[in-house]
Image (cartoon, rainbow, N blue to C red):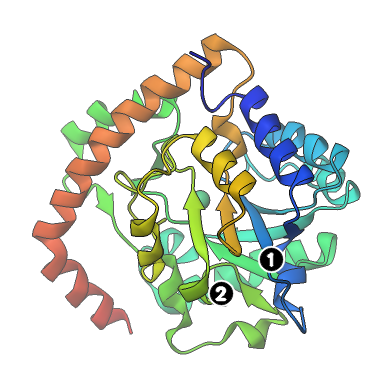
Amino acid sequence: MELDFTLKKYKRLIQAIAKSDYVVFTIRDYLQLKEKPAKLILLRHDVDMDPFQQLKCAKMETDYGIFSSYYFRYTDEILKPEVLDEISSLGHEIGYHYETLTKARGDITKAIEIFRRELKYFQKKWNTVTICPHGGATVENINAYSLKDLSKLPFKLLFNTNLFSNWNNREIWGTYSIKDFGLIGDAYLSIDFDNMLYLSDTGRSWSNKYKIKDVVKTSDNLLHYPKVNRTNDVIALINEGAVGHLYILAHAEQWKDNFRDWLKWLMAQQIRRNGKLGLKLYWKITKQNQQSKIKDTI
Ligand SMILES: [Zn+2]
């Protein structure tokens, strides 16, 4: 059986899109459409780690005349200006993947300050006009995406009592509006998901069993497509062409080009998956606590 979530498989997906009659839009271009075509695909990438892997996907897409949106987190490991420059020059959109409420540990005023500063950098360098909240579970400065980071977890667990943060980065928009920042939209908040099939590859699966914040609330329409699990299912869906509007979120870093890297990712993912189920339970228990904390800060 052919491995799923390899760059080869991603190429198959891109080829299927390219030869279909779907029109592909970046989030920026979609939000400015006066009239929406009957068949369209929004293609978005969240850059949670490994900026260099994005470049491979970006080049591949450009080869097939496809242009998409890349949302970069503002961290030292991810924000490599030379990579963003190249992706931008290939014709893709550069967006800002914000996580400022997490960075400010729930302090909205501070979060807005950080947001303003980080966004300015994106705007100045890449004319960024759209943003997207980062939803990854953060465990005390560890974003559990790699085996290296995960290996720090047991140590942290021993010495820290308040480990898990469950800030929803979208919540900074209670008192402020994104329009105040010269933006045209947010890749979640500005999209009407009622008539859109939302497909996310989070956790190397297109089904939404293991997802925490990546699940769009109104995306009940996913229920009508229980068969969407593997990339081949997404390709079949595109070939079939029955769904008019598709929104595809792909994390380039998990589409590996050799088996060793593919397996390493899978191991880290297994830990994350089980960890996430654990985190869900933890948050359920402490929900009351978290909610009162959020109210206090507003
Ligand atoms: Zn993210």
Residue in the picture at 49% in, 72% down:
193
Q: Position of residue 228 (x, y in %)?
A: 43, 44
Mark 1 or mark 2, earlier in chain: 1
- Crowd rating for badge 1 (residues with CA inside 10 Å; few <14, some 14–19, many 20+): many
Check residue 27 in the rendering and tell me which mark sits there, or answer none.
Answer: 1
Residue under circle 2? 191
Left or right position of 70 against 224: right
Give the camera-side residue of 194 and 284: 194
Residue 84 appears in the picture as rendered: yes
Asked which secondary structure carries label 1, the reply is: helix
**Cβ atoms under marks 1 and 2 closer than 8 Å:** yes
Residue in the picture at 24% in, 81% down:
296
Give the camera-side residue of 45 and 241: 241
Give the camera-side residue of 264 and 118: 264
Left or right position of 84 against 267: right
Asked which secondary structure carries label 2, the reply is: loop
Check residue 154 in the rendering and tell me which mark sits there, or answer none.
Answer: none
The CA distance from mark 1 to mark 2 is 9 Å
Please identify the residue farthest to the left as the structure is shown.
285
- Crowd rating for badge 2 (residues with CA inside 10 Å; few <14, some 14–19, many 20+): some
What type is the residue that disc 2 sits on?
Ile
Quadrant, the C terminus? bottom left
Residue in the picture at 20% in, 73% down:
291
Please identify the residue farthest to the right as the structure is shown.
89
